[in-house]
Amino acid sequence: MKRRDLIKYLSVAPIAGAAIGTGVPFQALAGTATAAAKRDVIKELGLRTFINAAGTYTTMTASLMHDEVVDTIQSASNHFVMINEVQDKVGEKIAAMCHAEAAMVTAGCWSALVLGTAGVLTRMDRKKVALLPNLSSFEKTEVIVQKSHNVGYVHALTNTGIVPVEVETAEEMERAITSKTAMMWFLNSSGPMGKIKHEEFIAIGKKHNIPTMIDMAADVPPVENLWKYNDLGFDLVCVSGGKAICGPQSAGILMGKKDLIAAARLSAPPNGGNLGRGMKVNKEEVLGMYVALEKYINTDHAAEWKMWEDRVATIVNAASKVNGVSTEVFVPPVANHTPAIKISWDQSKVKITPRELLKNLQNGSPSVEVMTGPDAINITVFMLKKGEDKIVAKRVQEELAKAAVS
Ligand SMILES: *Cc1c(COP(=O)(O)O)cnc(C)c1O
């Protein structure tokens, strides 16, 4: 390019031009990022943003990533790398942090459930990988699950073609084992409801040489759960990346036995002609997940818990000022194990339904999302940003006070 042409070209496309002309793509791309950051697409499209006092719900985009995670995504996006190498390296790091033999980053916990089950069914047999979800030529096609654990998430497993077999007691579980049994699946959030507890469940699996998998998607905190179920002896452990860990919302972790993780990867991208080709995670999610997990593990969890309790106190104090309103603080024993508030009221004294209250909170400024029940609203505080507890406290108090009979 002649200098004159180059100048002309640079004035039209300064950023791309700089990258090509000067050989400093990093600086050029950093410039792109700054320009992009100034554009507020959410505002441009008129999308409603809100304070999330509800919790980590997929429909609300679940959680917000920390700056370190976004920075990782940003810097990773400037380079080509081999995705298998990224998965290898990150897998080793995650496995070491969580006491597993091996790990991979998946497209959410759901995808970890699908791919882990696929790995159990196919092992390293690529012909089998190509057949899923058609199991007509497979010997092992059943997954044992406790009746109280057989809820919607089982659909992740049935994607692979397996059939769930329900049991209630350990004796029933033993009797249900046949040459068709491929795996045993434990839904951690239903743990307290089931008759067979973790240890016994694993022991039965080991006795019959059948792999066990646990879904603990939303079950940190406590942080120890990230290694507890590996230590206990589950062969596969599935976690959401975009809930309390605050990784990319489209990421999750599958970890466990080395041979099963290697097998699961055959059904995942970049491999094709398989069940999981659509469950893609690129380097940005894989590396972002790694950094988020590391940050989460290194968090001062006691200090964080104290902060949540302070937020809860702020909201409880405000809401309780309205005559006829009662509050209850609770911590779910498993899954979203963080301090939460149930606010209910005597509807003859405060004339508003939970649905109407939610509408008013959504329509207020700033907009606030909470969960509603038949006679209460539920608030969780772990997805709030700094200072938002005071806004939620004020808005809830205002709306309840407005509806109060004087
Ligand atoms: C959220 C959740 C999933 C799905 O996790 P994603 O990361 O959204 O794919 C699976 N199982 C349970 C119990 C969950 O709570």
Image (cartoon, rainbow, N blue to C red):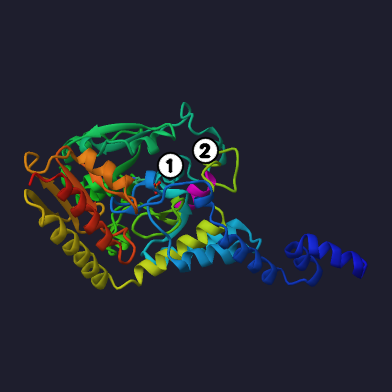
Question: What secondary structure do most residues of the magenta stretch adopt?
Answer: helix
Q: Which quadrant does the N terminus fall into? A: bottom right
Give the amino acid at mark 1: Val
**Badge 2 element:** loop
| The quadrant where residue 389 appears | bottom left
* Left or right: 365, with 135 as reference point: left
Q: Which residue corresponds to mark 1?
A: 114
Query: Residue 148: where, in percent of width, then height?
Result: 21, 37
Contact between labelled residues 2 and 1, with CB atoms less than 8 Å apart: yes
Front residue (pair 312, 236): 312
| Residue positioned 71% across, 68% down in the render | 25
| The quadrant where residue 155 appears | top left
Q: Which residue corresponds to mark 2?
A: 275
Neighbour class for label 1 at 10 Å: few (<14), some, many (≥20)? Answer: many
Q: In the picture shown, does residue 47 fall above or below 320?
A: above
Q: Is residue 209 visible?
A: no
Magenta highlight range? 261-268
Does any atom of ligand 1 lie closer than 8 Å to the CB of label 1?
A: no
* Left or right: 176, with 289 as reference point: left
Neighbour class for label 2 at 10 Å: few (<14), some, many (≥20)? Answer: many
The tag earlier along the polypeptide, 1 or 2, is 1
